[in-house]
Image: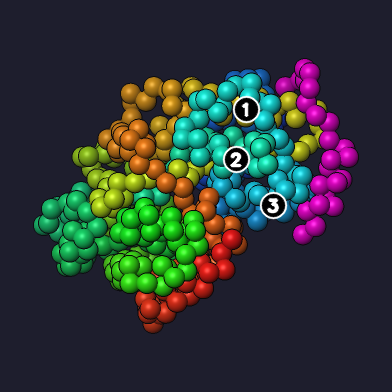
Amino acid sequence: MNFRSVAAFLAASVVLPFGAAHATDLEVTHWWTSGGEAAAVAELAKAFDATGNRWVDGAIAGSGGTARPIMVSRITGGDPMGATQFNHGRQAEELVQSGLMRDLTDVATKEKWKEIIRPASLLDSCTIDGKIYCAPVNIHSWQWLWLSNDAFTKAGVEVPGNWDEFVAAAPALEKAGIVPLAVGGQPWQSNGAFDVLFLALAGKDNFLKVFGDKDAELAAGPEIAKIFKAADDARRLSKGTNVQDWNQATNMVITGKAGGQIMGDWAQGEFALAGKVAGKDYTCLPGLGVNAVIATGGDAFYFPLLKDEAKSKAQEVLASTLVAPATQVAFNLKKGSLPVRGDVDLAAANDCMKKGLDILAKGDVIPWTDQLLSADSQKQKEDLFSEFFANPSMTPEDAQKRFVDIIASAD
């Protein structure tokens, strides 16, 4: 794709939104299509519609891996939407560098985002060459093990308190006809599960050395070999899941057909939609109950450059609305994620969200692989772990060798 030629075309025709403009429709693309996600998106749309503009929903079914190429293709092909979801990190880096995305620095400065958005790494991930290009909307942490209390009761064992106890309880679950660990077939799920196991079992320092410093020698060593053994356990325990989408795997936990799932805190939206209560119907273990550290990844909205003055002005309004206190509370309570503002009231937070807020308050946070690795390196990891979970003949040793090659060449 020739990003720069498209950028030149758009730059020549764009009208910057200074001054008043009429309210307008604004198409917003995203990949939030599960029941819980749709309920959360409705809060964003309601808040934006209240400004007099209109949110035109551009949901793309599937996942980020399915949606992102479509979003990028539209932007580079000269058919940009008004705003689009990406994970804050490096996914939109090339689009920004090619001059296709709007600079939000003026909005961010006016509304003092640097003072209110916490942790600061969220806004850092939106910043390229000193300019801010996205509006963070949540902190979505991957590092959770979600457990069905009913499943463990049926199996006659205590609800586990950590990963080792979970693995030890697996035979009892299997005897009761329950899949121990639900892992859907989308590549990002197995890739994310590995990363969560890595952080929980190898620790923060090793995680940052491998993914941040690209330390291939450490990646090849015995400490990381233990992670591949754990991934092998996860692969074995997930046999029989037989679903594709992440929310289908979550539903297996909700209905007691599976004992647990390694999944981000967005799973809470599905539990809430099903009327399940944290601490009563399900248990959540941040850091797999081993290492209570959460990543400060999540979702943000980027704004392609537009020629239409009214729509450009509406982009500013949407960016402001997304970060507004009331929007942050309404959206994140439905989404299961944490707010990006440190000054909002979340008295209604459930037990699991309170655990996340406590970890965040203590500063036990870490950048996630989306922020540390390029989209290309992440795709290579996804391909590896998708194959590993689907192919029992691939040994942990073989998988580790391929992983080392990815880290050695990662950018």
Q: Which residue is mark 3?
A: 94
On screen, residue 114 above or below 80: above
Q: Which residue is mark 2?
A: 126
61 relative to 245 in the view: left or right: right
Kindly state the secondary structure of the residue where label 3 is placed: helix
Counting other residues with Cα less than 10 Å from the Cα at mark 3, is it few (<14), some (14-19), or many (20 or more)?
Answer: some
Between 110 and 278, the residue placed more toward the observer is 110
Sequence order check, earlier mark of 1 and 2: 1
Q: Residue at x 53, y 50 (%)?
A: 371
Whole-number angstrom distance, CA of label 1 to CA of label 2: 11 Å
Q: Residue at x 72, y 41 (%)?
A: 101
Q: Which residue is mark 1?
A: 108
What kind of residue is marked 1?
Ala
Q: Residue at x 59, y 58 (%)?
A: 375
The range drawn in magenta is 1-23
As drawn, the residue found furthest toward the bottom would be: 393
